[in-house]
Amino acid sequence: MTTKASPPPSSDTKQAGKIIHPLFVRITHWINALAVFIMLMSGLKIYNASPIYPLQFPPDITLGGWLAGALAWHFAGMWLLAINGVAYLLYGIVTGHFWRSLIRFQPIAAYRNIRLELKRLILHGTGEYNPVQRVLYIAVIWIVILLVFSGLTMWKPVQFSSLANFFGGYDQARKIHFFAMLGLAFFILIHVSISLAVKGTIESMFTGRLAQKPPKKNGAPK
Amino acid sequence: MSAQPPVKPKISLKDFRPQIERIERRLFLKQGLSLGALSMLSGCTLKDDDAVDKLLWAMSRWNDRVQAAIFDPAKLARTYTEAEVTEPFPFNAYYEEPMAPVIYGPDYRLELSGLISDKRQWRIEDLRALPQTTQITQHICVEGWSAIGKWGGTVFKTFLERVGADLTAKYVGFKCADKYSTSIDMPTALHPQTLLTLDFPGKPDDTKYGYPVKVRIPTKLGFKNPKFVTEIFVTNDYPGGYWENQGYNWFSGS
């Protein structure tokens, strides 16, 4: 049986031009990237002023020049991170973006084609968050929330005493802040590596559109 | 040695201009995205006068206002037991420990100035005659470390009332024997745990923690707690301070 029927209004090209990253997600993503860069680099410098562990970060990857500069960056950057983060969370909840793209998981669809799913575990650029992406993105959202609240505890252990009690005091909050930062750094390492490795992902985070053709569905003609 | 260099075929730089320009452009873009951007940013350290530094200073002033709004005059810092006190209490200043001033008690006078009605000088025994109290609280340094210490003295509000300070003024400033200075907001000065301190951590003859007079403020970072205080003044003009003038956040409340 010949399957070379008149091509349906090419689903591939249709997919390729589709907006896969909503404009709001793209804007908040890049503002967040800047905010996280500022917080991470200045945070390493602040850590270096009085290390918790026998470990110092190379000054070349820190921001602010000296402790006062790093603190100024950190306490300016926190507003960018927090305002942008709250906007993203509200958008994600109100529009259903979180439900659609992160949380909703369809087991039947997932197991319909195991081979495709396995491929999608590592394959990006399909226009949908794959299972690994979903787990990582949900995890990193919670890591940033943990960073914000442990950070607020360190900033105001007296005024936010209930937060301080929750985290077990200033020093405990400081350790949690440190390990959450390591978690975030680890996420960035994976996230950026995959983005660089898979063609078109970074481009689509600017244009919103799928740059490359999605992988062929099963049943493709021989 | 004096051999003439072999005559090379004439190659003009012009012939390679397009290629060179392409390479330069590529290098510029690459650096612009990575190291260049980073080093340009890390040059902003509050010590220059460029646009980013101005923005950082403005954000710091904004954070002063936010912290003043968050500050609850009735909220008390957690207190600890004698067993939790850090021994030995860490020494910290803008100079090394041996440089700490040693003040001869009998000659000491605390001076008052600014919006204070009774500017009479105070001797240590006059300050001792005021109602005394002790507290064990956590000292948090702007560097990140913390220590628990025990301090004794007079509630600062009691002292300010006694000398007839204008309690509606904005700031209380401190000048110290080690040329250090700092200043705090009036609501913090009137906080029940802000202490005009006469008893310090360590042994009774240990003077390095601020003898004879320190102001202990458990609702502020360590550098806002002046040691070796020789003058207290009340003012409506922003007084700044040793570290604050260099870029550390002025309010620095806990």
Image (tube, rainbow, N blue to C red):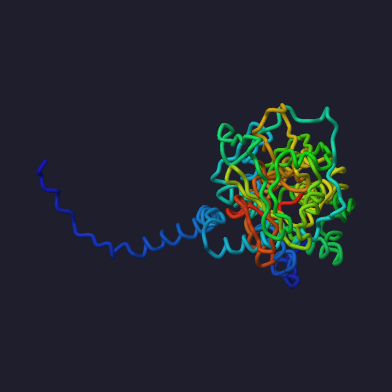
Q: Among all residues in the image, which is located at the extreme left?
A: B2
Horizontal and vertical percent position of residue B68: 77, 59
At horizontal 81% and vertical 58% (from top left) the residue drawn is: B70
The answer to whether B113 is drawn above or below residue B210 in the figure is below
Horizontal and vertical percent position of residue A200: 64, 59
Q: Quadrant of residue B147?
A: top right
Horizontal and vertical percent position of residue B132: 83, 39
Task: Work out whether residue B226 or residue A33 is closer to the camera in this orientation and state it.
Answer: B226
At horizontal 74% and vertical 43% (from top left) the residue drawn is: B216
Direction from residue B175 to residue B16 in the image, left or right: left
Horizontal and vertical percent position of residue A175: 75, 39
Direction from residue A181 to residue B79 in the image, left or right: right
The answer to whether A134 is drawn above or below residue B202 in the figure is below
The answer to whether B86 is drawn above or below residue B162 in the figure is above
How many marks are shown on the rendered structure? 0
Task: Work out whether residue B88 or residue B12 is closer to the camera in this orientation and state it.
Answer: B88
Direction from residue B4 to residue A115 in the image, left or right: right
Q: Is residue B238 visible?
A: yes
Q: Is residue A132 visible?
A: no
Task: Work out whether residue A218 or residue A38 is closer to the camera in this orientation and state it.
Answer: A38
At horizontal 58% and vertical 53% (from top left) the residue drawn is: B246
